[in-house]
Structure formats: C-alpha cells, structure tokens
Amino acid sequence: MLYQSLVQPSKMGDRAYVYDRIDAANYSAFAPITWCIFFSWVIFTSHTGNGGFLSQMASWKGFQITTRLSYTFYLTQFPVFFFNVGRVRHSDYYHFQMLVSWEKLYLFFFSLECRT
C-alpha cells in the first residue's frame, strides 16, 4: 500500500509521462489510506507519551486559537454548502466571476471604509 501511494506515483511527475487511468486510480485509492495510517501512528505515539518534540509542538497553547477557529469553520461549512446546493437547481459552468460575489465584496469594502 505504501508503494502504491508514495513510490509508484513518482513517475507521474515526469514531463514525458502519459496519463494512465490505472495509475491515477491506484493513487486516488491508496494515498488517503496511507496518510490516515501515518497520522494515526503520529496521534498514537503522541497519546502514549512517545511523541517527543512533535507531541510538545502539537500541544503548544498558541494552537488552541487556530484549533477552535478551524473547528468553527468546519461546523459552519455544511449549512452553507447545503444552502447553496438547495438554491441552485440546475447545472452551470463555473468561472471566476461566479466564485466571487462582487456585490458582497463591494458591500464589505464599503463597510470597512465607512468605519474609518
């Protein structure tokens, strides 16, 4: 599994590489599993007290702010996502102008300018 997800896809970085769907499927199937096993091992060693520097770095008090913020964004992404999925009832071609709501962006900058 480690070979399928880390060593074998290295040839995909070659400029002369021709796309192969089997290589892409193997990488897509095994890379997430390998990363999960790796992070599970890191968490396990940190939990048992054998993490060393990595465990000390991960338990730094400064990370509490970013941890709480990232968890907040994680929890709020699903209602926003489902609202957007429920609002759009047709397939559409997405481009950069659709990703940015210019009206909301102008309103945001205008509200910042009004505060100063």
Image: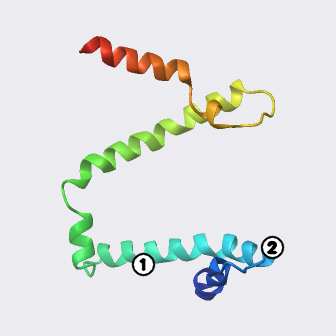
Q: Which quadrant of the rendered structure holds the C terminus?
A: top left
Mark 2 vs 1, N-terminal side: 2
Find the residue positioned furthest to the top: 114
Q: Residue at x 23, y 68 (%)?
A: 57
Question: In the image, what residue occupies the spot 63% across and 31% down?
Answer: 97
**Residue 11 position by quadrant:** bottom right
Q: Nearer the viewer, mark 2 or mark 1?
A: 2
Above or below 1: residue 63:
above
Where does residue 61 sit, x and y in percent of width and height?
A: 18, 55
- Residue beneath disc 1: 41
Tell me the element at label 1.
helix
* 16 shown above or below 100: below
Quarter of the image holding residue 14?
bottom right
Q: CA distance from mark 2 to mark 1?
A: 30 Å
Where 92 sits versus 49, above or below? above
The answer to which image quadrant residue 88 occupies is: top right
Read off the residue under disc 2. Answer: 21
Within-10-Å neighbours for mark 2: few <14, some 14–19, many 20+? few
- Residue type, mark 1 in image: Trp
Q: Position of residue 18 (x, y in %)?
A: 78, 77
Q: Helix, strand or loop at disc 2?
A: helix
Q: Which mark is residue 63?
A: none
Callout 2 amino acid: Arg
Q: Quadrant of the N terminus?
A: bottom right
